């Protein structure tokens, strides 16, 4: 571990719990916040990919962020997902996150419209200059069809309130390049559960995890061990989670994780179209992971 910062360790990419009709279940959201505080999760990401940000309108998006901050009562850091493929929209959401008291923002690369590396640089620079809040870059080319290069990330790292990057490529060569080339005080997070422990052992500062929705204490313990250089403990704990890491992506995220939390009685089964409920075949596979972890 190369840095002393509050935003390190296990951070959960939180689901947005919904009733069967697709409306947000704020009671379940409050209970999930408590669940993660009790389990030792270091931060909650509200309204990221796993939170179904793509299918909530602007008013709902801001309200879920606001309620998550309210429920936290300052006991856990809240990182708001405010990325968009329109720079002006991302600025509007980021301003809203600052106003409601979020600790930082996570901004996915602009998806679908496929900007150049210079366009990505100018996009993030404009948001950082427009809103005085800590901001974290988020690269997930498998979803966005655009890949933020290491060179562009390094260039952006010189902007004071751009404090880190979530790298969800799953490519440890990219992780090594970021670790080698970014400033020592730039936070480096894995966004890929399957490779997160190895990423942290290489010098990363934590991970933003889908698996932490289901097994927050185990994920936290594995990441903490890795940050402390205890490879044996980190890998031993993580070995119990390998099936979960894999099968939470058996269908598009967050379809499997929402079903898992429904089985754990943490939320109702609601999910918004065009996402659908987990198929029966996939349920059989994921249920075995939940049983082996003792969460159902």
Image (spheres, rainbow, N blue to C red):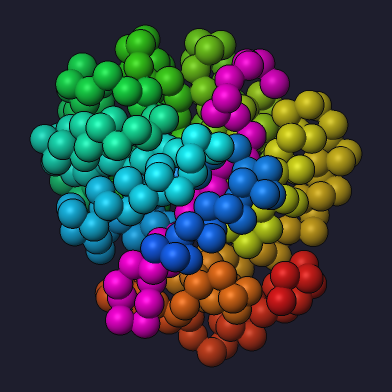
Q: Residue 60 versus residue 250: which sits nearer the camera?
A: 60
Which quadrant of the view contains residue 276? bottom left
Q: Is residue 294 covered in magenta?
A: no
Which residue occupies 79% across, 35% down? Answer: 225
Against 228, residue 231 (above or below) is below
Q: Is residue 10 covered in magenta?
A: yes
Outermost bottom residue: 280
Q: Which residues are magenta?
A: 1-25
Do we see residue 223 in this rendering? yes
Q: Residue 74 versus residue 108: which sits nearer the camera?
A: 74
Which residue occupies 38% across, 77% down? Answer: 19
Which residue occupies 49% across, 43% down? Answer: 72
Against 204, residue 248 (above or below) is below
Quadrant of the frame with the C terminus: bottom right
The x, y position of residue 46, in whole percent, is 40, 48
The x, y position of residue 31, in whole percent, is 53, 60
Which quadrant of the view contains residue 126? top left
Q: Residue 176 versus residue 43: which sits nearer the camera?
A: 43
Quadrant of the frame with the N terminus: top right
The answer to whether residue 42 is left or right of residue 51 is right
The x, y position of residue 135, in whole percent, is 36, 27
Q: Residue 223 versus residue 78: which sits nearer the camera?
A: 78
Do we see residue 116 in this rendering? no
Against 9, residue 210 (above or below) is below
The answer to whether residue 219 is left or right of residue 269 is right
Outermost right residue: 232
Q: Main secondary structure of the magenta part?
A: loop
The answer to whether residue 219 is left or right of residue 235 is left
The x, y position of residue 93, in whole percent, is 21, 40
């Amino acid at each position: 571990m190369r840095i002393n910062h509050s935003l390190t360790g296990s951070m959960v990419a939180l689901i947005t719990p919904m009733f069967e009709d697709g409306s947000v279940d704020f009671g379940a959201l409050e209970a999930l916040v408590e669940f993660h505080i009790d389990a030792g999760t270091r931060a909650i990401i509200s309204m990221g990919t796993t939170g179904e940000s793509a299918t909530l309108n602007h008013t709902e998006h801001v309200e879920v962020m606001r309620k998550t901050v309210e429920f936290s009562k300052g006991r856990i850091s809240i990182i708001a997902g405010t990325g968009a493929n329109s720079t002006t929209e991302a600025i509007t959401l980021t301003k809203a996150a600052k106003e409601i008291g979020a600790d930082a923002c996570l901004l996915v690369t602009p998806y679908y419209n496929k900007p150049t590396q210079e366009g990505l640089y100018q996009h993030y620079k404009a948001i950082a200059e427009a809103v005085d809040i800590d901001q974290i870059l988020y690269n997930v080319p498998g979803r966005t069809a655009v890949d933020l290069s290491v060179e562009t990330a390094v260039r952006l790292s010189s902007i004071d309130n751009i404090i880190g990057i979530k790298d969800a490529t799953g490519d440890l060569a990219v992780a090594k390049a970021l670790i080698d080339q970014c400033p020592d005080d730039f936070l480096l997070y894995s966004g890929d559960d399957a490779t997160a422990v190895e990423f942290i052992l290489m010098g990363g500062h934590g991970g933003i995890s889908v698996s932490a929705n289901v097994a927050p204490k185990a994920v936290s313990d594995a990441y903490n061990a890795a940050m402390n250089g205890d490879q044996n403990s980190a890998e031993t704990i993580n070995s119990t989670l390998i099936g979960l890491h894999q099968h939470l992506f058996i269908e598009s995220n967050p379809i499997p994780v929402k079903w898992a939390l429904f089985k754990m009685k943490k939320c109702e089964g609601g999910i918004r179209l065009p996402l659908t409920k987990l198929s029966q075949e996939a349920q059989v596979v994921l249920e075995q992971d939940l049983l082996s972890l003792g969460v159902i």
